[in-house]
Amino acid sequence: MAELSTALRIAHAAPAFGIDGTRQFCQRIARLAVRSLYAELALYPKPGLVSLVDNGSHQDMTAATFVRSLFALRRYFLLITQAGMADAPFHELKRLGIDAEARMLRATNGINTHRGAIFCLGLLCAAIGRCRADGVVLTPSAIQAALLRYWGRELGAHSGDAATPSHGTAALLRYAASGAREEGARGFPSVFAVGLPALRRTLAAGRCARRARIDALFALMAHVSDTNVYHRGGPAGALAVRRSARAFVARGGTAAPDWEARAVACHRSFVAARLSPGGAADLLGAVCLVQSACAELDLT
């Protein structure tokens, strides 16, 4: 029913762009979302996280698991961009996300690879679609403003809903750590005020996209209260992640001559401690999406 309701809204709004133009735009954003998550997967060294090089701190998932998940999510990103363009209410966006999570779990045999990304990148796709429908030039501030204007109230209420059990919910309740829902309720400040500026500073300095993503990831790890880390390592693990990330940033990040050796050493220490900053990884995917959607720069 959610897809039908959204389709009717799109049909009503389509004359502003034409049916073909509307669908092409949504397809482009969906491709950028998938490419952004693949860019996060392919990045290395990435402390404690699954990459194309190794499985990080995880024994139950590999890069192949993530690729299967990405294939399962392609249509979701298209549909939620269309839904945002059609001014769909929050309950429709939520239903699309629930359906996408079910497809992800079927594709991965029950392994949670992208639950946070479904929430985070899905909402950003909806906000990007809304900007398109409003005729607003895509900028980070415009995307964030659309997210808060159209769905901010429901996101605020949703942030306190712990009805759906997850490791993040358990960490939230046990340690009072913030998570994806709290980020969403505030318009993803870590994406727009932390990760994206870090990525852009590195690109502006003339360093490559890989180094820009590394700098963005470490900036996010130094800043966010990651429920994935709290679940695995408790407060001590969370403190270790933040201290390691802040030390990397303080030395200049990827501008330091020994940055790669330091990032690899951090990765190995996280693996030894079974720490995995998956929340920061999801936010990095979101940073890559916002950057590529606004700048029309293919970061893959």
Image (spheres, rainbow, N blue to C red):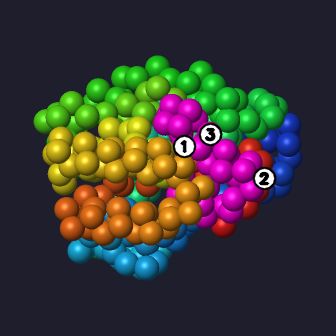
Residue 122 drawn at (x, y percent): 52, 47
Q: Quadrant of the C terminus?
A: bottom right
Residue drawn at x 36%, y 55% as measured from the top left: 278
The residue that disc 1 covers is 195
For mark 2, give the secondary structure.
Answer: loop
Please name the amino acid that badge 1 sits on. Answer: Gly
Residue range in magenta is 188-216
Residue 84 drawn at (x, y percent): 62, 38
Looking at the image, residue 257 lies above or below residue 195: below
| Earlier residue among tags 3 and 2 | 3
Residue 282 drawn at (x, y percent): 45, 52
Based on the displayed image, in which of its 4 quarters is residue 66 positioned? Answer: bottom left
Residue drawn at x 44%, y 69% as measured from the top left: 261
Please name the amino acid that badge 2 sits on. Answer: Glu
Q: Main secondary structure of the magenta part?
A: helix
Based on the displayed image, in which of its 4 quarters is residue 106 positioned? Answer: bottom left
Camera-near label (3 vs 2) is 3
Viewer-closest of 50 and 259: 259
Q: Are marks 2 and 1 in contact (CB under 8 Å)?
A: no
> Can residue 46 be found in the magenta stretch?
no
Residue 35 relative to residue 89: left or right: right
Q: Are marks 3 and 2 in contact (CB under 8 Å)?
A: no
Which mark is on residue 296?
Answer: 2
Q: Are marks 1 and 3 in contact (CB under 8 Å)?
A: yes
Inter-mark Cα distance, 1 to 3: 6 Å
Residue 236 relative to residue 225: left or right: left
For mark 1, give the secondary structure.
Answer: helix
Inter-mark Cα distance, 2 to 1: 18 Å
